[in-house]
Amino acid sequence: MRKSPSINHKFYPLFVLIGLLLIWHLITTIGLVPGFMLPSPLDVLRAFANSFPELMGHAGVSLTEAFTGLALSIMLAFVIALIMDCFEGIYKAFHPLIVISQTIPTVAIAPLLVLWLGYNMTPKITLVVLTCFFPMTIALLGGFKTSDADAVNLMRAMGARKWQIYRYIKLPNALPGFFSGLRISVSYAIVGAVIAEWLGGNSGLGVYMTRVRKSYAFDKMFAVIFLIALLSLLLIKVVDLLERKSMPWIYRLREEEKLE
Amino acid sequence: MKKIRLQTKNIGKTYAGELIIKNINITLREKELVSLLGVSGIGKSTLFNVIAGVTAPDIGQVLLDGFDITGQAGKVSYMQQKDLLQPHLKVLDNVALPLFIRRLNKSQARTEALKYFEDFGIAGTQDKYPSQLSGGMRQRAALLRTYLFSKDVALFDEPFSALDAITKRAMHRWYLALMERINMAALFITHDIDEAILLSDRIYIMTGPPGVITAEITINPPRPRADEFLVSENFLNYKRQIMKLLAL
């Protein structure tokens, strides 16, 4: 039996990753870069293990902000997409503005939000919402607008109400796009929370990062960076699983085809 | 004379300043199979949308059992060349969709729909997704969906025109046999002369533009028609007459 090519593919990036880590390790051991500026991967690992409880505490705060912001932005995305799909005038008036709003860099508004909203979770969650709602809104709206006009007409001919057209045609059609948007948004969510934390607060990965930076603890810096990357990766994986579960008509079929 | 189910009176429709169809008067009686035959782009689908209630005509009326249903969707269902089965719904739910729309309890709707799977030749497909079905099977499912919406009057807009010749022939045979069993009156829109002669009790010939009904032909041999009818002199005579009317 032939090995599935997808399994082999997964090993290539893994090899590259291991190679990069080795090179990194070599650079630090032969002293090409001073150890206090670039800690070796082992140092980072050690720092990670030593400050694990602390890291988890901060991660909990950042994840709370990220999830709250994400949940709010999902709701916001659905509401905005629905309104813009229903009312052509609102779509025409607001769609360009929303697109333009995305050219404002997150980092630039974060300080303002902190000034306005204080040092608690509110400015962080707000920033997460501001960065996350956009990819999903656009994806959902695209899905609604590209729904088969003939299918919508047929539904109408069968006497369907507006919500039934969304329920049976438009929402399912928007689902694949929504998940692509969500995948982008989850990684934005964590980064957004961390950036907002840089600028003030008592806890969270961003706050921790600022603290260890000020004490030049590079190993701990790297540990946080890797933790953030790891968390984003995990969340993307969760989105993948959700996507598989919620669109069986795409994924179950693919699996069945593979079995044949 | 059988009872008139569906009737259009003097329907006219302009689109973007251009007259598409005018003075369309057609009737569809109980259990009757009637075709509307014309070349592509003559306004058949416009008329179709008007009857289905999806678009309102500029003038004229659509009557169902004597009641004015002009511009009202949700009265007569239709089926197109595109089966319009929803990829995310299993075949059973696709077929039961008109019942879901009517807010019937889901399990009740499914039980009701499942009753007809055997009769419509799609038994065993209920738990599949539409993409797992062949073109012919998908059209059968679409027809069952249409039937579940309104059991006695339906519109068909070139439903079999996307199928290959052999599948199409099989579908014609199946369709005629089915129509004997379910007593549905159907208005069948097509540009295929053979199909129209084979499947109809009467044929309206539409020419234009703008699209007008220029002739009405009754096809006499009783249904269901044997395969020999397709190659009979009788059949060819009808075909000759229609070709002349369409100025082909």
Image (spheres, coloured by chain):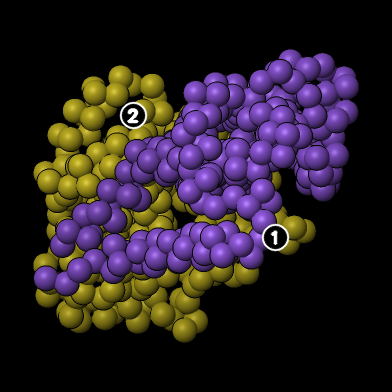
Q: Which mark is residue B49?
A: none
Q: CA distance from mark 1 to mark 2?
A: 37 Å
Q: Are marks 1 and 2 on the same chain?
A: yes
Q: Is residue A96 visible?
A: no
Name the quadrant containing residue B152.
top left
Looking at the rendered structure, the kind of residue marked 1 is Leu
Residue pictured at 35% horizontal, 82% vertical: B240
In the picture shown, does residue B206 fall above or below A116? Answer: below
- Rate crowding at label 1 as few (under 14), some (14 to 19) or many (20 or more) other CA atoms within 10 Å: some
Q: Colour of chain A?
A: purple
Residue of label 2: B99
Looking at the rendered structure, the kind of residue marked 2 is Leu
Q: Secondary structure at mark 2?
A: helix
Say which label, 1 or 2, has the lower sequence index: 1
- Rate crowding at label 2 as few (under 14), some (14 to 19) or many (20 or more) other CA atoms within 10 Å: many
**Residue A51 falls left or right of residue A119:** left
* Parent chain of label 1: B
Residue of label 1: B19
Q: Whole-percent x and y of residue B97?
A: 35, 35
Q: Colour of chain B?
A: yellow
Point out the image quarter for the N terminus of chain B. Answer: top left
Residue pictured at 82% horizontal, 48% vertical: A103
Residue pictured at 35% horizontal, 73% vertical: B193
Name the quadrant containing residue A197.
top right
Q: Secondary structure at mark 1?
A: strand
**Marks 1, 2: nearer the viewer:** 2
Which of A227 and A24 lies nearest the eye of the viewer?
A24
Mark 1 vs 2: CB contact within 8 A: no
In the picture shown, does residue B73 fall above or below B29? Answer: above
**Residue A155 falls left or right of residue A135:** left
